[in-house]
Image (cartoon, rainbow, N blue to C red):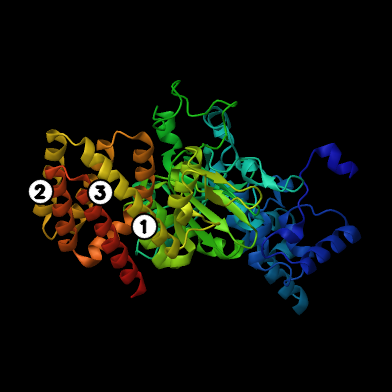
Amino acid sequence: MKEFYAKCAIRYGMSGIKSVGSAVVDRIVEEREANGPYKDMKDFLVRMTPKETNKKTVEALILGGAFDSFGVKRRQMMMAYPMMIDEVYKERKNLSAGQMSFAEFFGGEFAEAAKTKFPDVEEYDEQEKLALEKSVLGIYISGHPLLDYEKLMSEKTAFSSVDFMIDEEEGRARVQDLSICILGGMVADVTIKMTKNNQNMAFVTLEDMVGQTEIIVFPKKYEDYREKLTADNKIFVKGRATVSEEDAKLIAEEILTFDEVVAGNDFSRYNNSGRMKPRRENAGKPEFIEGDLQVWVCFDDRKEYDELEKDFLSILEEYKGNCPVYIFIKQEKQYKNMGRGFMVDGASGIVDRLKLEYGVSRVTVRGALQKLAALGLIETKLGDGSYVGNASTQTLLQPLVQTAFISDNSLGEILQFRKMIEGAVCQEACKKAEKKDVNTLSKIYQEMVEAGKDLRTFAECDYRFHMEMAKMTENSILIQMYHIVNEVMRSSFNKVVLARGNQAGLYYHKKILEAFQKGDSMQARKEMEEHMEDLYKSYQNHFNQ
């Protein structure tokens, strides 16, 4: 240890060097303690047996820096050691046969000239030297490939791999879940995976001066940045942190090479100052997502979610929108907001896709109940968190009493509730309808007729027709209640329309329109309730198949 402090050396266990086992290390130490330090590489080869001096072992010792104290460049030793091993082998063979070599016979200058010489070549460039060193040590010892870029990385990033490591005392990473981060480093490894849609995505190990972080690159981003994701390439990655109790990763959004940044390029949509580094006081804070509706997906336990996470996130990437997504881990009773980057379009078919992948009972749309509570139309029971209607709305809202997840059956109950709301909306709208309002409904109805077999367009027109009626009531409470329930059911209505066709819908909308034109509010309500009942039956039939 006295020698260590005096020379400020770096101590690394020799048995940790690739191809150098503990038996070899024991033999090296034993020989050194018996006959003194090794003078040079030739002396080392002579004093070791052929078992300890095979070419793989000698090569690993050279590249790992074990022979640096001999004052010879690593590249010189790599070029000379095969001939030096052969030379030592021949000397041993002659010695065992009782023969003398020409060098030994003539001695002096002839013997010196006969020794293997180190070639007069330059050392490996720093990047290659360090890469070879890491190939046998697993880490960098004599330097780091990013050392020359330390100032650039400090200026451009507010995070490092340390922020993504799990702190043993706190049990979590420093970086906050869903926060926007920029990391800089070198691509250490790239693993390409095929998604269920036969698209390539990548899992990248990004290495900086202090450690490594896993970067997830989804298919669309992978296609944009695949050329930059090559081994040893130096890049900056901007993305969203995803943090669990076990690890923390970064979901890539944008990637720039160091050369691009040096040339003046910057990440889009960041600080007004143009600097890539976020302000420290705001760095790492998760975004709060507001929204009336949420898509929830339930997983049995953390292990199941971890196994399915990659495909799950890939699916969310395909349905970008404004509806937040939450996961619920049943066994651990934990939930997680997937963040703004994974918000989906609730009417795009994402709910159907998730139900197909994970099961009908595991996927639902939530949020309407919380909104109704905020409006004062329903109240939260103390203790169990379920909802009940207040005195004035108990009758209408009883079907909305829910627990943790809304099942398909309770979606049907909401459809029944909508029938009652629709009837009230239709009656009030008809009472206040003016000629221009009826003309608006007539125009939307005509678009429904013209949609023909384009059922998706028909479903969208159907939605607009009903929302127009709600606006005609001029009753803010009715409009808000109707909007909430209609949004909850929108994707399910579209699904039923696509399944059964548009003829029944055209029939009832025509009847409703005729009642509006006559100013018969009671008839309008009756037609609407019959329409909702027909839709409810179609909904039940569709999901019972």
Tell me where residue 518 appears, x and y as whole percent: 12, 44
Q: Is residue 355 visible?
A: yes
Secondary structure of residue under mark 3: helix
Numbered label attached to residue 167: none
Most distant residue in the top direction: 273
Frontmost of labels 3 and 1 is 1
* Residue annotated with mark 3: 463
Q: Nearer the viewer, residue 424 or 50?
A: 424
Crowd rating for badge 3 (residues with CA inside 10 Å; few <14, some 14–19, many 20+): some
Q: Nearer the viewer, residue 272 or 533?
A: 533
Q: Is residue 377 left or right of residue 129?
A: left
Q: Label 2 vs label 3: CA separation?
A: 14 Å
Q: Is residue 39 left or right of residue 374?
A: right
Frontmost of labels 2 and 1 is 1
* Residue annotated with mark 1: 415
Crowd rating for badge 2 (residues with CA inside 10 Å; few <14, some 14–19, many 20+): some
Residue in view at x 21 percent, y 41 percent: 430
The N terminus, quarter of image: top right
